[in-house]
Each structure stands twice: as structure tokens, then as C-alpha cells.
Image (cartoon, helix red, strand yellow):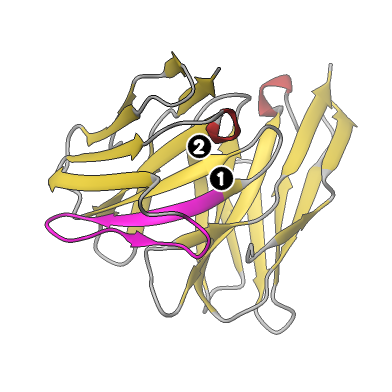
Amino acid sequence: SQQGEEDPQALSIQEGENATMNCSYKTSINNLQWYRQNSGRGLVHLILIRSNEREKHSGRLRVTLDTSKKSSSLLITASRAADTASYFCATALYSSASKIIFGSGTRLSIRP
Amino acid sequence: GAVVSQHPSRVICKSGTSVKIECRSLDFQATTMFWYRQFPKKSLMLMATSNEGSKATYEQGVEKDKFLINHASLTLSTLTVTSAHPEDSSFYICSAVFPGLETLEQYFGPGTRLTVT
């Protein structure tokens, strides 16, 4: 079974607004990663946050991690039409730092 | 950044035939590669871990005789779908582990869309 569950499953917002996606997982992790996938394409790595980190920024992206609640969030600020994609969280378990398990994903649509 | 390629990008085959998908790390050596399967509008499901020079490790529920994995070199892993059936139609994605300083980052290929008729 998959490690992570994401919500919402789908999100539609107006261009310029902020988008927040959440991810919950079940077991202890080494790190958590967020990926973007455009329709029918491969995955693009966005950001990695380690289990001992609480927040990380990269451009318009802000990721938080709460290991006590086993949850993470991805915030995209000032959204653009090009941000339309599916976003997945993925967790790397302590037992294997490189093997990652993907969450169910959030389909984000940005309305112009 | 590191580049991973997959070939072919799309393949249509008849039921009962076998299909081979290649995954190559173009500018780095990858001792470990992963194979994923993705159904439409669904997440990626890890199928197996491919290690250079040793047998692949399959996830629970994945038939090793159905999905043959060979990691022949540090830059190439192949996935062969044997005796393909329509239910094997899917998007197959590989990733290669880039050995960094602190974490083992994965770089993903563009995927191969398999359609079995």
C-alpha cells in the first residue's frame, strides 16, 4: 500500500492565488520529497526536506514537515498557469534512504 | 542536472508478445534504478529496485517472471514485460539514483506508454 495520502485530490484556483497541498504518511521517514508531473510526462523533483527539518523554501515553493503529525504541506505562492500539473509527495523510509514511496497526488489546475 | 532517458517513449504491441523498455542514465553512473508503474490519473506504484550486478528486488504483488529486470551496466536497466496482456497497458517510469553527498537523489525518465491490444 502507498505510504502517503494527499489532499485535496484536486484543486482549482485562480492565477495569482496561493495553492496549498497536504500530505500525510504512516511510518518514520528519512526525508520527504515533492514532485511535479505534467500530464503524460515524467516527474520533476521540486524539493526535499529531511526529517530533522521543519520548513524549507525554494523560489515560490514552501514546504513544511511535522514529524509528530506525520504530515507535510506544499505551498505554491502567486500561482501561474504553468503550475498546472499533478503534485506528489514521496517518502524515503529509514530502512532505505533511496527507495521512495509516492502519495496519491493532487491535481492542480490554475485558471487564467 | 542529471538526465535519464527511456526508450521507447511509446509502444503498441499485440497480446502475447514481449516488450523491452530501456532506462539509461546519460551523464552519471547509477548503481540503483527503480521501476514504477502509473495508471491514468493515479500515483506511481513502485514495482522493483534494480541493482547493477545483482538480481532485482520486487515489491509485493509484482510478478518477477512477468516483469523481467536486468541491470546490465551502471548506466542501463531494462524492463521486459513478458507475454503482455491488455491489463499490462500502463505508463512505466524509471528513475536512477544519483549518489550525492548527503542524500541519494533520484532522477526520473520521461516514461514509456505501453498499449497492449
Q: Is residue B4 visible?
A: no
Instruction: Find disc 2 in the rendering and name its residue.
Output: A43
Pointer 1 or 2: first along the chain: 1
In the rendered image, residue A62, in percent from the top left (x then y), is placed at 65, 53
Label 2 Cα crowd, 10 Å radius (few <14 / some 14-19 / many 20+): many
Q: Is residue A94 left or right of residue A101?
A: left
Please state the horizontal and vertical placement of residue A19, each as a whole percent of the image.
80, 42
Q: Is residue B41 above or below residue A73?
A: above
Q: Is residue A89 magenta?
A: no
Task: Point out residue A12 in the picture as x, y percentages from the top left corner.
Answer: 87, 32
Q: Nearer the viewer, residue B13 or B71?
A: B13
Label 1 SS: strand
Residue A110 placement, left or right of A50: right
* Stretch of the chain drawn in magenta: B45-62
Up the image or down, B104 lies above or below B65; here it is below
**x and y, in percent, of residue B69 in the image:** 28, 47
Identify which residue is drawn at 54% across, 73% down. Answer: A53
| Residue wearing tag 1 | A35
Residue in front for this viewpoint, A26 or A33: A26
Residue B57 counted in the magenta span: yes
Residue B65: mark in rendering: none
Figure check: B41 above or below B14 = below
Q: Residue furthest front?
A: B16
Q: Is residue A64 visible?
A: yes
Query: Which of A51/B106 is in front?
Result: B106
Q: Secondary structure at mark 2?
A: strand
Residue at horizontal 38 percent and vertical 73 percent from the top: A96
